[in-house]
Amino acid sequence: MSNRLLIVDDAMIMRLRIREIATQSGWEVVGEAASGGQAIEMFRSLKPDLVTMDIVMPQMDGVEALRVIREEEPNARVCMVSALNQREKLSDCIRLGAIDFIVKPFEKSRLASLFEKQGRRQ
């Protein structure tokens, strides 16, 4: 059984880039969301093994979506993927249970390393 990933980012180009790296790393992308609200609904229905979550998105940001997801599923694995200027949110994300924080723009190897490490946890 392959590892299942939910990609959350309001920028389609970022979702495509993450999808490409994930599939090359042997992950199945089970869903893509463009807002925090969509992320929560998709998490509930898809039950992914891992979520990559942007922070700055319309309607509901990634920090709030992370909070809701972790309240509903304390073992949920969520990696924040956001721009350098969002670093101040890092402590909030870690406090809420994010497993990692990857800064955009990221190197392919950095994201591939995350997928490899998390894939071994299955």
Image (tube, grey):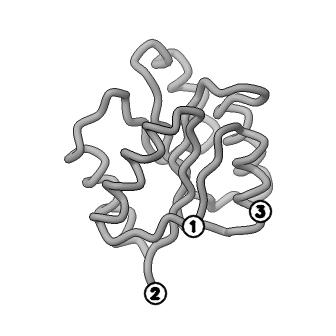
For the C terminus, which image quadrant?
bottom left
Relative vertical location of residue 43 with respect to residue 40 in this rendering, above or below = below
* Mark nearer the viewer, 2 or 1: 1
Q: Position of residue 71 (x, y in %)?
A: 78, 50
Q: Earlier in the sequence, mark 2 or mark 1?
A: 2
Q: Which residue is mark 2?
A: 1
- Determine contact: label 2, label 3, CB under 8 Å: no
- At 38% across and 35% down in the image, what residue appears? 102
Q: Which residue is mark 1?
A: 30
Q: Position of residue 117 (x, y in %)?
A: 31, 61
Compared across the picture, whether 8 is left or right of 65 comes to left
Helix, strand, or loop for circle 2?
loop
Camera-side residue of 5 and 73: 5
Camera-side residue of 34 and 104: 34
Label 1 Cα crowd, 10 Å radius (few <14 / some 14-19 / many 20+): some
Q: Position of residue 22 (x, y in %)?
A: 36, 59
Q: Earlier in the sequence, mark 2 or mark 3?
A: 2
